Amino acid sequence: MNRKFVTRVISIGGLFTLWFVVTKYQLVNPLFLPPPKDVWEGAVDLIQAGELREHIAASLWRMFMGFVVGSVTGVVIGILMGQFRLFHAAVGPLVEIIRPIPGLAWIPVALIWFGIEDASKVFIISMGVFIAVVTNTFVGVRSLDPVLVRAARSLGANHRDIFFRVVLPGSLPYIFTGFRLGVQVSFALLVAAELVGSTSGLGFLIQDARNYFRGDLVILGMAVIGALGFSITRLVEIVDRWLLRWQPTSREGTFY
Amino acid sequence: MTVSLQVNGVSKEFVDRRSKSTVRALDEINLEVQKGEVICILGPSGCGKSTLLNIVAGFLPPSGGEVRVDGRPVVEPGPDRGFVFQEFALFPWRTVLQNIEFGPVLKGMEKGDRHARARELIQRIHLTGFEDKFPFELSGGMKQRVGIARALANDPEVLLMDEPFGALDAQTRRVMQEELLKLLGETQKTVLFVTHAIDEAIVLADRVMIMTARPGQVKALLGVDLPRPRERTSPEFNELYRTMDDLIRVEVEKSLEVQDSGAAASGEGA
Amino acid sequence: MQTQSVSGRLGISTISVAGFVVLWQLCATLELVDPLILPSPWMTIQSGIRRSEGGELLHHIIASVVRITEGFFLGSVLGILIGLLMGQVRIIGEALEPIVDILRQIPEVAWIPLAILMFQMGEGSKVFIITYGALFPAIICTFDGVRMTDPAIIRAARSLGAGRGQLFWRVTLPATLPHIMTGLWIGLGYAFRGLIAAELAGAQEGIGFMIMLAREDNLTADAFMGMALIGVIGFIAIYGLGAVRNRVLRWHESTQE
């Protein structure tokens, strides 16, 4: 741990020193790489004005709403597809048609449908989350070991018991993989959607700063986006690890 | 003595998906098991011994004939027939205690009662202190102890065991056989035990049913009249072993011939 | 019985998709929904035909394809090289890992404003975003792959007389290949995302630009057509990379399905 910690400090410290030196001697155009001091002062201004908090709140709220809508529909449809072959035959192809279209390509249409306010972003995010969750949920239900269903039946379980006590907990690891991937994907979607058409949010913040040639605020916004994305993924991971503590090791995600 | 389990003329046919032909897996199996009796089923692989067990459990419907447990015909799986799986089939998201009390929970038994029952069983399978462990934290032998306790928690009429120790190493197997005998001595359960190990059958069984190669028929039903605990090195044990080995070997060779000719007939490898 | 139900399910799938398209068309024909909100499938196709005239559509397609090819190639090659270097030279690995860990948290789309500041609206900003998207998955997966190489096969190769160079070319690199392919796989998705976002945010050509323009002019049918086109191009790219993977990794269990 010690060695790792030390190299970590040295390497990150080195990066900041480099930034400091490069900007001090103006080796790079200060328009897009302002000195650390400028970024720091920009941050202080933005926090004091309460603006940063507003943008973060706007982004988080959209993220949350989109996640709820996308994950609920994804889990329900994924389970139905996994449990009923007929439903899968009917709905599966429609999901397959939507899947190759990247969530981002929906942005212009979402803007036409839902306007420039929150609804269009919620739609985009829920789309990204839905695709990740529906696929993984379906795979989870299908890959459930049939011997567990037989075991439950021999212990006296009826259809209801099997669904709630076997199928649902059994596909939970996959559902959570879907949540994790969905959150990762849709956070980037959100930033892009806010960049392209919005009047608030972190994506808007960096785009707006760019319009005023405020490189310091652009970099600040990027840092906040990175930190927020990291925290959200971490949060999902923590919940995931607690709920799935019956699993021997960490799982790899299914990338589609 | 009361009859606990009746298998009356049970047959099973499958449709082979590739050749579209009907395969007869079981042919007119008859068996009557007394309450508290331990029957081991021996046979070459593919003879349908697991199929028979699955029919008794109600996982598969028979193509002909019927199974009765305690006089009632079997139509679907139920808690009167506890099943122990070779692959353990523990619910990975439930702790040892929660796995064992699964059946009682489904029955709606009160928390205090089912905890008490589960704890008693945990004590009898020597897993005290492991109540809150998840299956992945247990060794194979421990997992199967939980599997047996989970089946017993429903207090079933019959215990169906499908090569339950097949996935365990030789030492653990021996220990598990001894523990199972002790448990059965205490509970007086009727047991149908599928295995391909002859010595396991002789150690455990009151009677051993030997099956033919496909289509599976009853080739022989031999009583094991040796005093317990049975000594693997005794002459009587070995005598019985040799008898059964001879009976089975013929069937294994037959099943291999069938496979060879089948492969030749289809004209290509896998 | 089994085969019947399979063909039955196929029938249901066909009916479901066809029904969906018919319903969609009906909505427009019967004017249940404003075509500005939901253009009919036929209008979408028509818009494709109209835009093809004079080679306009082809022009946008080529612009996008060239960008994604350049950026994906650049990002992948750079990422694999950096990943291999980090895996082979311990000091480089330890020094770069924390920096990679920080930079990978920032999605490539968040770089768009800065990229535009750096390169203005030119090609540079798009290729930069796409490269960035492909870069980090390639680095991380390659690095992981090198570190996760089974020590037993390295020992086996050494006992068979492999030297340092041989060890790298004949053992480490092939053993890392499945991980590299995974990195490219994920990277392709990010690169694609970067392409569209960059074109949406500011470009003069490309499919993303075309649908953004359509949106501003309220030409919903054109936006739909562009979306479908993006889906098709993405599908082809994924299929192509899958074919490469199956060829390169034909010894690996991941391709034995």
Image (cartoon, rainbow, N blue to C red):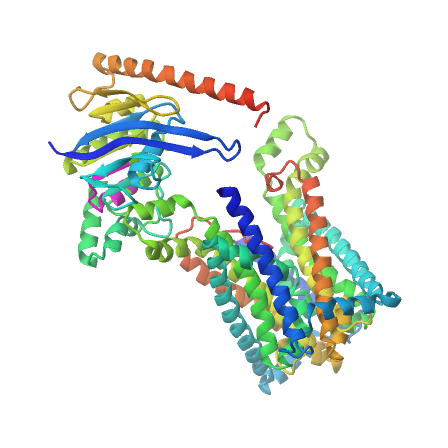
Left or right of A77: which side holds A34? right
Query: Is B106 part of what is drawn in magenta?
Result: no
Whole-percent x and y of residue B170? 34, 27
Q: Which is nearer the eye, C246 or C183?
A: C246
Horizontal and vertical percent position of residue A204: 66, 78
Residue C30 or A142: which is nearer the viewer? C30
On-image quarter of the N terminus of chain B? top left
Q: Which residues are magenta?
A: B147-160
Q: Residue at x 64, y 35 (%)?
A: C251
Q: Is residue A64 visible?
A: yes
Q: Position of residue A187 (x, y in %)?
A: 59, 68
Residue positioned 58% across, 63% down in the render: A184
Q: Is residue B155 magenta?
A: yes
Count of picture labels:
0
| Quarter-of-image position of residue B140 | top left
Return the residue found at the far bottom.
A49
Residue at the extreme right of the image, as rendered: C54
Query: Which residue lies at the image location 56% right of the left edge and 76% below the top edge?
Result: A62
Q: Confirm whether residue C115 shows in the render.
A: no
When the figure is inspected, residue B213 is found, relative to residue A91, above or below; the finding is above
Q: Is residue C131 left or right of residue C25?
A: right
